[in-house]
Image (cartoon, rainbow, N blue to C red):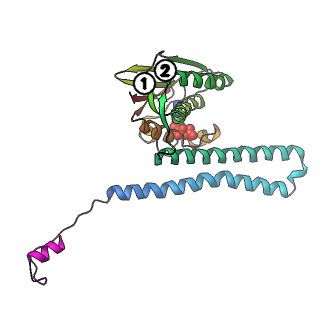
């Protein structure tokens, strides 16, 4: 534009107008803030188990190792915290893989939804049984195939069912259903657990967002499960909705267009 103005006006010292350039930076600032927050969150989440591990190792070295009972208890804690670190790193790698949507990591194929859901059912049924939770699975037979990454599809359902089991007290019910409607496949994961307060629902799919940090930690959560679900659903061109009444349960409804 500057060169064009100079051409129009042979004398570059004569002012013939003003050029105002406005750049909208709100979105850039928002992304930058999210990135900074994410790095801070990751550091904090990694540091917590590490501090605990180092603390117990130090105590063992300082003499606790001689007491068999104390030693076993501390080693147990170290093991639990190390497993937590592994889960966290695995989830971070999965999330970065899905988010970057690299062609090499997103191997797409036709997925037999019925077949996959039956496999997931067999696996999750066992976990529910251990917690005395009734697991009901209703899958419409002859569901049409969908196109996308099979591993990601499985991971998405497992994360939702795993949460339903984690946040439902003993004696509760987890119901998974899959059906075809409106040229889409719907997958619903519904539980009779603690539910989610209305105010928390809009932020639920953010990384590391938890309604109750202490409870999430206790049940072994990394705070990344739903962020992973959201990005997988997006990779299928779908959407996920949450319906919940606090204290009565929650439903996560995934819609994937055919
Ligand atoms: P986490 O590893 O903490 O479970 P997620 O990303 O999977 O992390 O879930 C985020 C938060 O959403 C959880 O900490 C929990 O507070 C809430 N949440 C997820 N699923 C359910 C559910 N089925 N019932 C109640 N709360 C849930």
In the picture, residue 173 is in which quadrant? top right
Per the image, label 2 sits on a secondary structure element best described as strand
Q: Is residue 243 above or below residue 27?
A: above
Q: In this rendering, would 35 be left or right of 162?
A: left
The residue identified by callout 1 is 186
Q: In this rendering, would 75 be left or right of 221?
A: right
Whether residue 249 is visible here, answered yes or no, is yes
Q: Assess disc 1: are there few (<14), some (14-19) or many (≥20) residues with their C-alpha within 10 Å of its C-alpha.
A: some
Whether residue 243 is visible here, answered yes or no, is no
Q: Position of residue 134 (x, y in %)?
A: 60, 18
Q: Position of residue 66 (x, y in %)?
A: 91, 51
Question: Where residue 177 is drawn, which disc sits there?
Answer: 2
Q: Is residue 20 above or below residue 78?
A: below
In the picture, residue 241 is in which quadrant? top left
- The residue sitting at the top extreme is 141
Q: Are marks 2 and 1 in contact (CB under 8 Å)?
A: yes
Q: Which residues are magenta?
A: 1-19
Q: Position of residue 138 (x, y in %)?
A: 51, 16
């Amino acid at each position: 534009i500057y060169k064009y103005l100079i051409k129009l006006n042979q004398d570059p010292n004569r002012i013939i107008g003003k050029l105002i350039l406005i750049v909208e930076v709100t979105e850039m600032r928002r992304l930058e803030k999210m990135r900074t927050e994410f790095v801070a969150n990751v550091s904090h989440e990694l540091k917590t188990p590490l501090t605990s591990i180092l603390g117990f190792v130090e105590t063992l070295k300082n003499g606790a190792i001689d007491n068999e009972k104390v030693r076993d208890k501390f080693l147990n804690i170290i093991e639990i915290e190390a497993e937590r670190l592994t889960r966290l790193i695995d989830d971070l790698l999965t999330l970065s893989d899905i988010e970057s949507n690299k062609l090499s990591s997103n191997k797409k194929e036709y997925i037999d939804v019925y077949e996959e859901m039956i496999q997931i059912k067999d696996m999750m049924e066992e976990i529910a049984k251990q917690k005395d939770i009734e697991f009901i699975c209703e899958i419409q037979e002859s569901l049409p195939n969908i196109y996308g990454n099979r591993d990601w599809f499985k991971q998405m359902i497992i994360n939702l069912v795993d949460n339903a089991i984690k946040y439902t007290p003993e004696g509760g019910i987890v119901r998974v259903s899959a059906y075809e409607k409106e040229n889409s496949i719907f997958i619903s994961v519904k539980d009779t657990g603690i539910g989610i307060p209305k105010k928390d629902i809009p932020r639920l799919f953010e990384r590391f967002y938890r309604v109750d940090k202490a409870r999430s930690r206790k049940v072994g959560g990394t705070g990344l499960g739903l962020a992973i679900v959201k990005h997988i659903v997006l990779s299928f061109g779908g959407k996920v909705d949450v319906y919940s009444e606090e204290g009565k349960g929650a439903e996560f409804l995934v819609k994937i267009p055919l």
